[in-house]
Image (cartoon, helix red, strand yellow):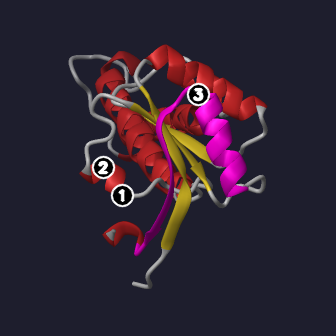
Amino acid sequence: MTPTSTKGVLGHFCEPADALAAAAKVRDAGWKHFDFLTPFPIHGMEEAMGQKRSWIPWVTLVLALCGILFAQGLQNYVMILDWPMNFGGKPHAAWPSYIPITFEAMVFWAALGSALVAIVAGKKDTVPQPPPMLVKTGATVDRFVLWISATDPKWNAAEAETFVKSLGAHGVRLVDVEGGADA
C-alpha cells in the first residue's frame, strides 16, 4: 500500500444545532468536499449539507418486484405445468398458498440486491475521508466535527481556516497527516 496524505481543516462544535447551521453555511459558501462526523444522526443534516436523496430505495423496490415476479412465476410453473398436485381439491393456481414463498423471495431479492448496490455505490465516494486520528482520539464521542478537505476546488488553507473559525467552531486546525489510514 502506498503512503497517502490527508490534508484539510477541521473544527468542532458542541451542539447539534450549531453543527446543522454550520453545515448550511459551508454549503452556501460553495464548499463541495466537506463532511460532518457526529456521535449520533442529526435530523436535517443531509439537507443542510446539500446531499441528494439516495437512489438505492428505488433499486430496492424494483428488486422486490422482481422477487415477487420470480416467486409467482416459479410457483405457477411448478404447480400448474411441471408437477401439478391436488391438495384437498384446491385449484392448482391457489395464489393464497403462494404468499409465504412470495414474501420470502421478495425480501431476499430486495435485501441481497440492495446490499450489493450499496457496496458498489459506496465505492463512488467523492468526499475524501477525514484523518483516521479523529477516530483514535474519540473526537466524535461528544463533539460534532466539521472536516473540509484540501481536495476541494475552492481550497485555500488560510481562507478555509478563517472560514471555519467564523462559523464558531472550536479547536480549528489545519491537518496534514502523512500515511493515510496508518496515521
Give the percent coordinates (x, y) of residue 43: 49, 16
Give the percent coordinates (x, y) of residue 36: 50, 37
Marks 1/2: CA distance? 5 Å
Report the span colored magenta. 156-179
Marks 3/1: CA distance? 22 Å
Between discs 3 and 2, the one toward the N terminus: 3
Circle 1 Cα neighbour tier, 10 Å, few/some/many (<14 / 14–19 / ≥20): some
Say if the magenta span includes residue 171: yes
Q: Which mark is residue 124?
A: none
Q: What residue type is labelled 1?
A: Pro
Q: In this view, does 11 lie above or below 177?
A: above
* Residues at circles 1 and 2 in contact by the CB criterion of under 8 Å: yes
Q: Nearer the viewer, residue 14 or 54?
A: 14
* Residues at circles 3 and 2 in contact by the CB criterion of under 8 Å: no
Reading the image, the residue beneath label 3 is 46
Reading the image, the residue beneath label 2 is 135
Reading the image, the residue beneath label 1 is 132
Q: What residue type is labelled 3?
A: Glu
Q: Going by the image, does 169 lie left or right of 33?
A: left
Between discs 3 and 1, the one toward the N terminus: 3
Give the percent coordinates (x, y) of residue 59: 58, 39
